[in-house]
Image (spheres, rainbow, N blue to C red):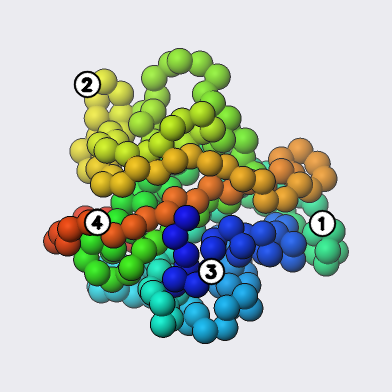
Amino acid sequence: MPLIAGAVDVSTVMEKLSAVRPVFHSEADFQHAFAWVLREIEPSVQIRLEVRQDTREYVDLLCFGPQGRTAVEFKYFTRTWAGTDPLTGESFHLRNHEATDLGRQGFVFDIARLEKFCAAGRASNGFAIMLSNDQRLWRPPATAKLTRDQAFRIHEGRKNLSGLLRWGTDGSYHAGSERTLSGSYPITWRDYSNLDGINGRLRWLAAAVAPPSEPVSADLSAASHQPG
């Protein structure tokens, strides 16, 4: 897998992060902690959160150094869990994000945005990272019934995300919600932490985005992202 800023493996960051922060209050908390640990691992890498690209575009985390420039997008999709961090004694009350279809959509949209950033030369590579305690994301669907997020599914057993992904069902696609991915992204969920109670297992998924083999023009406004 490509490295962050040409220097650090994303798995190394997540492994060290899980040892000190097994759970997060929010997506912003996750972003900040990831950046902190990355800098501890490799002080030569500069880190910037919520970097504005133009009037509409932001990237969650920009990492750069002598060996490269990496854009990172985060998703922290949670189900209800209340408990205590065993390392710090800190209390947590995770909110319930019920719309798993929108969680999948957001992850795919992040990949598409990162492809556009790389194609435009704004980053040498990118990572879309999803952290979740919602097993519905990584478990295969229970039925064969078609759903509007069918093409956006990210469960274990799916080979990869690639090509044209359309949001909707046959004959009822939603304009503006489709994405065409130029790369091919394997679906590999990895364990992050195991906490007490229902929904206490957290896992993570990362898509490594590389620049296209040939430079292409990219309309970044087609996939705008606001912070938060």
Q: Residue at x 41, y 36 (%)?
A: 160
Q: Nearer the viewer, mark 2 or mark 4?
A: 4
Q: Residue at x 57, y 42 (%)?
A: 189
Q: CA distance from mark 2 to mark 1?
A: 47 Å
Going from the N terminus, do you reach mark 1 or mark 4 first?
1
Horizontal and vertical percent position of residue 196: 82, 45
The circle drawn on residue 84 is 1
Going from the N terminus, do you reach mark 2 or mark 1 first?
1
**Residue 116 in view (yes/no):** no
The residue beneath circle 4 is: 212
Q: Nearer the viewer, mark 1 or mark 3?
A: 3
Horizontal and vertical percent position of residue 50: 43, 72
Q: Amino acid at mark 2?
A: Gly
Q: CA distance from mark 4 to mark 3?
A: 21 Å
The residue beneath circle 3 is: 8
Tally the numbered discs. Answer: 4
Residue 163, picture quadrant: top left
The residue beneath circle 2 is: 171
Q: Nearer the viewer, mark 3 or mark 2?
A: 3
Q: Are marks 2 and 4 in contact (CB under 8 Å)?
A: no
Q: Is residue 227 above or below residue 133?
A: below
Q: Residue at x 54, y 32 (%)?
A: 156
**Residue 70 in view (yes/no):** yes
